[in-house]
Amino acid sequence: MSDEDDRRAKPERRDPQAPEKGSMPRRAGDSHRVRAAIRDELETLAEAKSDEAPPTPGEGRDPARTVIALENVSLGFDQPILEDVSFSAKGGETIVVVGESGTGKSTILKLLLRLLVPDKGRVCIDGDNITDLTFNEALEVRQKMGMVFQGAALFDSMTVFENIAYPLREHTKLTDDEIEERVREKLSFVDLEPEKVMDQMPAELSGGMRKRVGVARGMANNPEIMLYDEPTSGLDPLTTGTITYLILKLQRELGVTSVVVSHDIRSSFRMASKIALLAEKRIAFFGTPEEMTGSDDKYIREFLGGF
Ligand SMILES: Nc1ncnc2c1ncn2[C@@H]1O[C@H](COP(=O)(O)OP(=O)(O)O)[C@@H](O)[C@H]1O
Ligand SMILES: [Mg+2]
């Protein structure tokens, strides 16, 4: 197993001081603010959509093709975590998975990467059930996916250049020149100046810049699928906005299909084609942001802070 796999296999660090719940406004006084924020967000989105030129066809964008599917997936460790969970993503869609802490959101990403296999059900990537694959076959499927880990998780002892070049050296036959060209291309895509940041160490960058380098590394292999685990956690609102925009940019310009785990409802509404709400081991809701705000379901309304 490579270092990268090692890192992936390890359960991520938890910060007991930062309950995910806290970022979902829950107090009654917050409900108006949340309602107004979500309404603004939906209006801005509707305007943006009507103004938009037709999107350029990205490689992965094919609304008729199911790229990702969980079918009746159940998984438990000491106790059941997911029960009969199903959802799917068509080509170019962004599915945002929300839910309280410990409901199994990161576990879903690990199932998609086949770092975990379900006790029951199927996980399909591009129509292929990946649960029965051999280790080597699974590595091949993983090459279709780029992952942005919680907290960016860059290698602290490597420069920005080496961080992004790493998956290319590991998994491709690109020459050094081609790798350098690719690293520059990805840094530019995430709006970082290659000349300025390539030789810097992660510790020298701001939190937002580290996240962008994390995205550049995740997309280095030109994956058709991107997975993000809480890409905006710990960021200020402005930086949250730029990362949200970046995820949208990958979807719109490259047609990437994405699954984003998020605790930030506002940014979820901006980027989601569909939202999957996990609660009590099941998908309590799966639908568009508009459908979610229109729902009368008591739990959903509570989840949205009384929206
Ligand atoms: N490798 C593991 N072994 C045992 N329990 C685990 C493991 N990974 C996750 N869990 C448990 O599964 C539940 C869901 O975890 P996780 O998917 O990380 O939740 P979330 O990302 O929604 O906060 C938690 O109760 C967690 O403690
Ligand atoms: Mg998690």
Image (tube, rainbow, N blue to C red):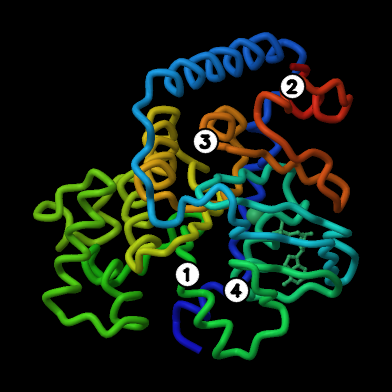
SS class of the residue under badge 4?
Answer: loop
Q: Residue beneath label 4, please?
A: 10
Q: How packed is label 3: few (under 14 Cα within 10 Å), some, or many (20 or more)?
A: many
Q: Report if the CB atoms under discs 4 and 2 are less than 8 Å apart.
A: no
Which numbered disc flags the more N-terminal residue, 3 or 4? 4
User: Whereabouts is ligand 1, in terms of quadrant?
Assistant: bottom right
Mark 1 residue CB less than 8 A from any atom of ligand 1:
no
* Left or right: residue 2 compared with residue 87: left
Depth check: 5 or 221 in front?
221
Q: CA distance from mark 4 to mark 1?
A: 21 Å
Which numbered disc flags the more N-terminal residue, 1 or 3? 1
Q: Residue beneath label 3, please?
A: 271
Amino acid type at image mark 3: Met
Which numbered disc flags the more N-terminal residue, 2 or 3? 3
**Which is in the foreground here, disc 1 or disc 3?**
1
Q: Quadrant of residue 251?
A: top left
Q: Which mark is residue 217?
A: none
Q: Residue beneath label 1, please?
A: 144
Amino acid type at image mark 4: Lys
SS class of the residue under badge 3?
Answer: helix
Which numbered disc flags the more N-terminal residue, 4 or 1? 4
Q: Residue beneath label 2, please?
A: 305
Q: Quadrant of residue 17?
A: top right
**Which is in the foreground here, disc 4 or disc 2?**
2
Which numbered disc flags the more N-terminal residue, 4 or 2? 4
Which numbered disc flags the more N-terminal residue, 1 or 2? 1
Q: Report if the CB atoms under discs 2 and 3 are less than 8 Å apart.
A: no
SS class of the residue under badge 2?
Answer: loop
**Which is in the foreground here, disc 4 or disc 1?**
1
Amino acid type at image mark 2: Gly
